[in-house]
Amino acid sequence: MAAAAPSKPEYPGKLLNAAAIAKPFQESIKADIRHRVDKNLPVPKLVGILAKPSSPSIAYAEWTRKACEDVGIKFTIWKTWDDSQDVEKFQTEDNSESLTNFGLEADVEDLILAANRDSSIDGIMVYYPIFCGRQDTYLQQIVDPRKDVEGLNFYYCWNMYHNVRWIKPSQMGSAPGATSEGDLRSQDVAANETVPAGFAKSILPCTPLAVVKCLEAAGLYDTHLPYGDRLQGKNITVINRSEVVGRPLAALLANDGARVFSVDIDSIVEFSKRPDDEGKQGLGFSKSKVVVEAHKQNTSARLRSAHLVSPCTYKDAESCVRVSDVVIGGVPSASYKVPTAWIKEGATCVNFSSEKNFESNVRSRAAQYLPAIGKMTVAMLQRNLLVRIPIF
Amino acid sequence: MAAAAPSKPEYPGKLLNAAAIAKPFQESIKADIRHRVDKNLPVPKLVGILAKPSSPSIAYAEWTRKACEDVGIKFTIWKTWDDSQDVEKFQTEDNSESLTNFGLEADVEDLILAANRDSSIDGIMVYYPIFCGRQDTYLQQIVDPRKDVEGLNFYYCWNMYHNVRWIKPSQMGSAPGATSEGDLRSQDVAANETVPAGFAKSILPCTPLAVVKCLEAAGLYDTHLPYGDRLQGKNITVINRSEVVGRPLAALLANDGARVFSVDIDSIVEFSKRPDDEGKQGLGFSKSKVVVEAHKQNTSARLRSAHLVSPCTYKDAESCVRVSDVVIGGVPSASYKVPTAWIKEGATCVNFSSEKNFESNVRSRAAQYLPAIGKMTVAMLQRNLLVRIPIF
């Protein structure tokens, strides 16, 4: 006899849906692809490189395939292993050593180089983590930056932190500061999304970009304010400061004018937009002449990062969350939960972790709650792919 | 009343000395500098960037200065803080937050960019760790590769793993496999150290290179064997598989013909030289067609790594050490010690950790023991500096 279904509590807050937010982006991607087909232009092709027969990676790869088929992007999966064998035993047996080490990096590297070389392939994504740490970072750097739709190359990383929006393809990979860049920054181009002649768009990393676009869709950006200031007056807590998501996300939000409390396991810092005139910074120690001179030169060469990092006014996560208009969770742990009691009445909560970082009653206080952003991340990946090969 | 000095035990093994090993390298560097001075050529200049007033970093920087003065290399330290203030309080107070976060990355980045731009500076070294993890890796990648004397740029990393010894400066930073490289490998040039016309020497990371040169000095390389096979027949255990030292070191030793047991906290793997004909590898699962095809193409394009990684024949550190002709310790922990009882009679033991990884009686079994390699690391750094600006 089935138990009666538990009555579902009704919360006033709105449940946001990444699929719905992704919809207009997917439509625009679809239209772009249709246009290419109509004009007999090549349809962009993405390759997904699967290093290990681990269930989550395989599921994610199949999901990317579906999302690409939906919009008309060609997609192919390259696996290191032969599918005709029984891979399930590799998923269940203790085979961590043979899978993570023996020849695996060489195989992944072989596939990345083959994809770099293959002119029919426009974009490469690799399903991480494979080895974790600097070994994965090494693999990310050997992907041809022109095909790096995930935006993981340090070249893009530097551009993001410095708000460099347009790049000269010929200068790709040159050392920052070593050459005169001749770039155009976002402050030059305002909200104008047209790529200037001779330039290409720089790539933003998919996941942070997806969060930004979700906040835009949720109405957090005030379009009456000038471009670059549209989060002005908003306090945002980001719980996670990983180099791949949390830190770039905090920087992007600060660049748009927000005051960002960046909470990590061992510290809390504040990200804010770098003011035009910095004045005296409240540093614990005063700066050397050489660093002051370097500041000055880099400022005039426009080579300084677009955000500032400073000690946080609030000393614990609770105090940050209590004053935040937006709370973003990215803690990869099933046991971590932001207590609903901390949430400011009417706040927006966004979860980008694979685990749920908010309690089930979060909408009793939050006005909006987005439990997952995966669909938007894939849409941003597709957008990055199309941006790399614009229709001229 | 002073206690009697403890009587020093006499061990049969020889105590090696990095200063003595470094001597001929320093002499050759000195001669090179003298030659430049005589010919009125510019004397190379190295800048050391100090992010934090931490005692070990300051000591290391002063030590580099001394080593540079000894051979005639110009050296200058750029600190982020003003020296006229009392920095000692920053070393003793709990100020981890203000020092590690507030504006510090922006300051270090400012100094790196200023050094990239400054044409009077030929080499840049940064005293790590600053933030650890991917944030330090990010800083390593913004150093102009032409001034990266530490060899930490991923471009050099890739070259090292693929035994690419000569580079075309114009192709620096291009994605591997994306362009035809037209490079010369070590197998082409044998032991010939002359840089071919139009090429420059690729840089090897200082610390692994220092260990290799110490083993050469200790007589472990059999000069009767062909170049590239001179460690043939030697078993070497490397305890540490960090991306910055342990893994590159294992690869370099394997490239020279050794069988390397790479021991890390969670696994043991074996590095060996990639055979000309690989045949069937004993993988736990069979490879996909796409990876086999990529292997083939990358092999003919000579884009495959020079070493293979396979499961280790021996399942624990003790078994590895017991059969090893050379044991190399790099564990950054004061409590970690390789038991002397494990050491094979007559083996050579080398410690590159800041802590002592061998017991005080190691020379009761080891024929040779090198307790520290710091002096050689600095000599290799200086060598990398000179290699970047050859006298034409």
Image (cartoon, coloured by chain):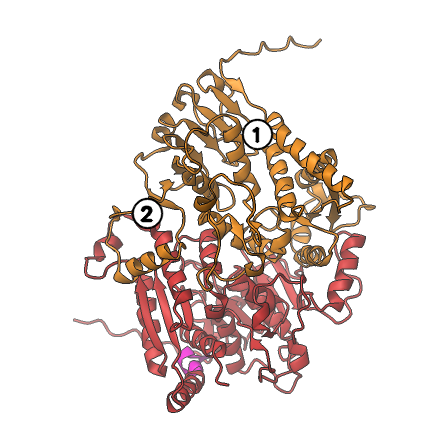
Chain colours: A red, B orange
Give the label on residue A102, or none: 2
Residue that protrudes farthest toward the left in the picture: A1
Q: Residue at x 62, y 33 (%)?
A: B25
**Pointer 2 local density, CA inside 10 Å: few below 14, some 14–19, many at least 20:** many
Give the label on residue B372, or none: 1
Q: Is residue B24 above or below residue A143?
A: above
**Pointer 1 local density, CA inside 10 Å: few below 14, some 14–19, many at least 20:** many
Q: CA distance from mark 1 to mark 2?
A: 32 Å
Q: Is residue A71 above or below residue B139?
A: below
Residue B65 visible? The answer is no
Q: Residue at x 63, y 36 (%)?
A: B379
Q: Is residue A192 above or below residue B129?
A: below
Q: Secondary structure at mark 2?
A: loop
Q: Quadrant of the N terminus of chain B?
A: top right
> Residue A60: x percent and y percent?
34, 67
Pick the residue in front: B87 or B249: B249
Pick the residue in front: A373 or B84: B84
> Residue A364: x percent and y percent?
47, 75
Q: Residue at x 40, y 47 (%)?
A: B306
Chain letter for mark 1, please: B
Task: Give residue A14's quadrant in the image.
Answer: bottom left
Amino acid at pointer 1: Ala
**Are discs 1 and 2 both within one chain?**
no
Give the label on residue B258, or none: none
Residue B141 visible? The answer is yes
> Residue A261: x percent and y percent?
60, 65
- Please give the range of residues in magenta: A14-22
